Amino acid sequence: LAKTTQPISMDSYEGQEVNITCSHNNIATNDYITWYQQFPSQGPRFIIQGYKTKVTNEVASLFIPADRKSSTLSLPRVSLSDTAVYYCLVGSGSARQLTFGSGTQLTVLP
Amino acid sequence: NAGVTQTPKFQVLKTGQSMTLQCAQDMNHNSMYWYRQDPGMGLRLIYYSASEGTTDKGEVPNGYNVSRLNKREFSLRLESAAPSQTSVYFCASSGGLIGDEQFFGPGTRLTVL
């Protein structure tokens, strides 16, 4: 089971870049890394997914080093509305090995 | 296009009672999932279904049964509810293989007394 570890919480100010790291030491060869955002009383929402190196979309970037034992979600120029819990998810082929991290509470301050 | 819908939104049960949580998606997705989320914790997978008629256990399947009777619907049943099953339950779906981008429903908040 690819257990994941994330910081419990982070604070940032509006307009700053935020980097949230997830450790997944036992990641399997076929596993993808996916990040989700969750607001209170809502289901998680997909942000970005990657396998290796760097992936970028309109809202975030995902950096994955060559050994794939960690990944970093980068949110450019955060705003107050980015205050949420961010989860990394590692897994691919097996239901028993699909593992969400415990989440990082990001608080964006004015 | 409603996405993923779940019923009910809230439910209170007494220990030993049974109930079924309903989930439906209108995105023509093959994969569907049931998760539970306990306070201050991440989501844990209960069951997964890759297609109609197939299911696979996740990390925490004990005390639950599931049914995937057609492509749209995936139900979760608690045969004899226990206080340890008090949680928020999320259903999700994805178009392809397990681990692809998942679309989540709004959740069902279940309390077992």
Image (tube, coloured by chain):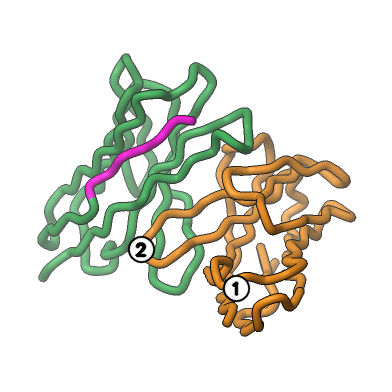
Chain colours: A green, B orange
Chain identifier of the residue bearing label 1 in the image: B
User: At 39% across and 41% down in the image, what residue appears?
Assistant: A57
Identify the magenta region.
A1-7
Secondary structure mostly seen in the magenta stretch: loop
Q: Is residue B110 above or below residue B41?
A: below
Image spot of residue A49 (x, y percent): 45, 37
Q: Quadrant of residue B104?
A: bottom right
In the rendered structure, which amino acid carries the disc numbered 2? Gly
Classify 10 Å Cα crowding around label 1: few (below 14), some (14-19), many (20 and above): many
Residue that carries the numbered disc 2 in the rendered image: B40
Image spot of residue A47 (x, y percent): 42, 48
Which numbered disc flags the more N-terminal residue, 2 or 1?
2
Chain identifier of the residue bearing label 2 in the image: B
Classify mark 2: helix, strand or loop: loop
Q: Quadrant of residue B58?
A: top right
Q: Is residue B34 above or below residue B58?
A: below
* In the image: residue A89, left or right of residue A64: right
* In the image: residue A18, left or right of residue B33: left
Give me the disc on residue B108: 1
User: At 48% across and 69% down in the image, what residue appears?
Assistant: A42
Viewer can see residue A18: yes
